[in-house]
Image: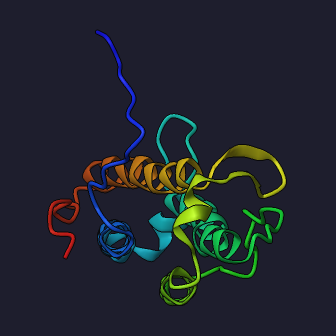
Amino acid sequence: METTTSSTSAQIIDKDQLLTHWLGHRKVTRRTLEAFPEKELFEFSIGGMRTFAQLIKEMLAMDSTTARGLATSTWEALDEEKAELTTKAELLASWDKSTEEIQGYWKDITMEEFQKQIKAFGQYDGTGYSILFYIIDNEIHHRGQGFVYLRALGITPPNFWEQY
């Protein structure tokens, strides 16, 4: 297959549509978190994988921090431990706060920032958009693990297509 490039660029979606897409995934992930019983959220795993609470903490370490990094060009080191989050209620509150922060920083992210070469979290090289896509893809991947956990626990996960 031959690939061609053009000096003009076409836009498929705009910045606000991208945010709406990301927030739609966050809504499904939040409903997945809500579906877990407290004990299993922090203790249940399959095949040596991390618990869903640990996966949520990883997502929380990256999500609003990515929006802040793209908006300010200042990247913090990752804190995936989030040892202070020990209950489901605390995870949900942190998720909601992070979502608000994403929305707050979004307006300050320029279109040029998505194209810039960056080093996210002081360790990951890429363009702004490739880092953001990784963050979204990572959330979807880990939510899939959460879906498997819920099914193993006899709980029906939320409908992934109900994002909006």
Quarter-of-image position of residue 18: bottom left
Q: Quadrant of the N terminus?
A: top left
**Residue drawn 74% across the image and 82% down it:** 84
From what the image shows, is residue 98 above or below residue 45? below
Q: Residue at x 45, y 56 (%)?
A: 136
For image coordinates 20% across by 59% down, the residue present is 160
Taking depth in this image into account, of 105 and 40 the one nearest to the observer is 105
Residue most toward the front? 7
List x then y, in percent, for residue 94. 57, 85
Q: Is residue 123 left or right of residue 128?
A: right
Quarter of the rendering containing residue 53: bottom right
Which quadrant of the rendered structure holds the C terminus?
A: bottom left
Instruction: Please state the horizontal and vertical placement of residue 137, each as a whole percent of the image.
Output: 44, 49
| Relative depth, front residue between 94 and 152 | 94
Expressed as whole percent of the image width and height from the top left, the position of residue 88 reads: 50, 81
Residue at 32% across / 75% down in the picture? Answer: 27
Depth order, front residue of 93/6: 6
Q: Position of residue 22 (x, y in %)?
A: 37, 67
Q: Is residue 5 above or below residue 23?
A: above
Q: Is residue 150 left or right of residue 154?
A: right
Q: Residue furthest top?
A: 1
